[in-house]
Image (cartoon, rainbow, N blue to C red):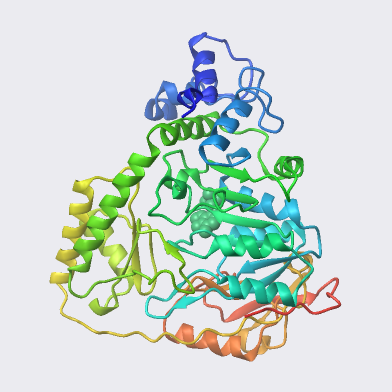
Amino acid sequence: MNRKQQETPIFTAVKNYVNDNTIPFHVPGHKQGRGCEELTQFLGYNTMSIDLTCFPDTDNILNPKGVIKEAQELAAQTFGADKCFFLTNGTTCGIQAMIMSVCKPGDKIIIPRNAHKSTFGGLVLSGALPIYIRPEYSERFGISMGVTPEAIEATLQEHPDTKAVFVINPNYYGTASNLKKIVEICHKREIPVLVDEAHGGHLHLSDKLPPSAMELGADLSASSTHKLLGSLTQSSMLFLREGLIDSQTVKSTLNITQTTSPSYILLSSLDVARKQIALHGREMVAKALYLAELCRKEIARIPGLELFEPEHPSPGCYSFDITKITVNVQNLGMSGYEVEALLRSKYHIQVELSDLYNVMFLISLADNEETIAYLVKALKDIVSSRNTRNVVKYCPPWPVIPPMSVSPQQARYSTTKTVPLEEAVGEVSAETIMAYPPGIPIVCPGEYITSEIVDYVKILKSENADLQGTEDPEIQRIKVLKSAFTLIEEEVGSAG
Ligand SMILES: Cc1ncc(COP(=O)(O)O)c(C=O)c1O
């Protein structure tokens, strides 16, 4: 390992600035905490004193030439990329920048239907046209999984003018697609692959995990360092593999989506997290994997709970991250939401997520045997107090992806009206309707509302499913386009 990996250029620069007893005549106006005493008392002087801004000592994130450049180069080396861009607006900003870097208005991009909402933001900002593909689906768990290389190949054949392919690696529940094959298919056509690695910052640190996008030759990947690798919330990294995408284009796009006032607390946390990963990442991840295995074994022994352990390789799950522990609680006669609330109120445990059927626990670098034992004990306790078993809830079949009338960007800027859901058939939606599970939009802005969709929403409502995305929380009414300013001449179909 390069000895420079022991260094932390940004963190060192901000500490030097503070140790120099510099008198600040610049923003932020709290001037090392003196202007906001209550917060300083809680966060401490050290935290407030490094809440700085861009000046020569601390470099400039929009055009780094000093410590940010050095820190980004070290991170690129650690994560196996040609270039790294630090982000303080979360992976959301990285995903938007990836899409805007490769797509201009009207360009087609292939996207799994279960992509995170930040992807939709990228579509609105870029004006790109999504060609949605259906991910594979686990009916038992109500979980959407990966996409197959075959689905990508077929969609590319149908839309040979596609400008980019977007992949999630892995998804929220830990399932990863066969990204290697997808990269091969796309690169044969010189189409870049953009990867949402919000949940994959740790992938390159163990052979037991799905490989990372950069290891597999993808062109861009956005990684939530804050989610799994110890940096602070909102701090992420965008990685580039040189070849199909010009780094200057990515840089100039980030200058649109990224703040001009990055938090040096967040930037320092990226710097220190990178150092920790470079020096100790493999052993820390090995420990997390050991604990995840232990936790899985214990939970598997609890009657009434069912672990999500998708077969892999299988079409929706080429490889799997076992640190995401999803547990189906249907057989307790409880929803995942109810188990989440009980764990929170009675056991002071907060889960990563819950849905109608499942709760999910995330095991990270920070866990230990005690936290795992406490979780297992709480689950055993909950199970022992239940006597309902084999309660199967209704899971309606998933409707086809509706045809698109206008692009997400055009839908965003069209005038709208609100109509009763029953009367919305044939209208173009201005809203997303999202059902959990499986966290896949039933309809997105710009798409036609079909009678199938209206019927599906009614079934879900009668099942008290968790439906989100519309202004009317009851979805009695829905916003549709009054006058779409430009219709796409050739209707863009979906491969679903
Ligand atoms: C799959 C996925 N992609 C992207 C994001 C956005 O990441 P961030 O919160 O860092 O902006 C998230 C956030 O939860 C996510 O789950």
Which residue is located at x 42 percent, y 28 percent?
38
Q: x, y percentage for residue 257?
A: 69, 45
Q: Position of residue 172 (x, y in %)?
A: 46, 61
Q: Nearer the viewer, residue 435 or 115?
A: 115
Relative to 196, residue 135 above or below: below
Q: Nearer the viewer, residue 355 or 222?
A: 222
Residue 438: image location, x then y, percent: 47, 73
Residue 209 figure quarter: bottom left
> Within the image, what quadrant is residue 104 found in?
bottom right
Q: Position of residue 6 (x, y in %)?
A: 45, 24
Residue 116 in view (yes/no): no
Q: Is residue 452 visible?
A: yes
* Towards the viewer: 113 or 382: 113
Give the number of marks: 0
Kindly identify the residue that appears in the image at 67 percent across and 89 percent down: 423
Q: Residue at x 64, y 22 (%)?
A: 66
* Left or right of 489 on screen, residue 84: left
The answer to whether residue 492 is above or below residue 8 is below
User: Which is nearer the eye, 439 or 464?
Assistant: 439
On the rendered image, what quadrant is the C terminus found in? bottom right
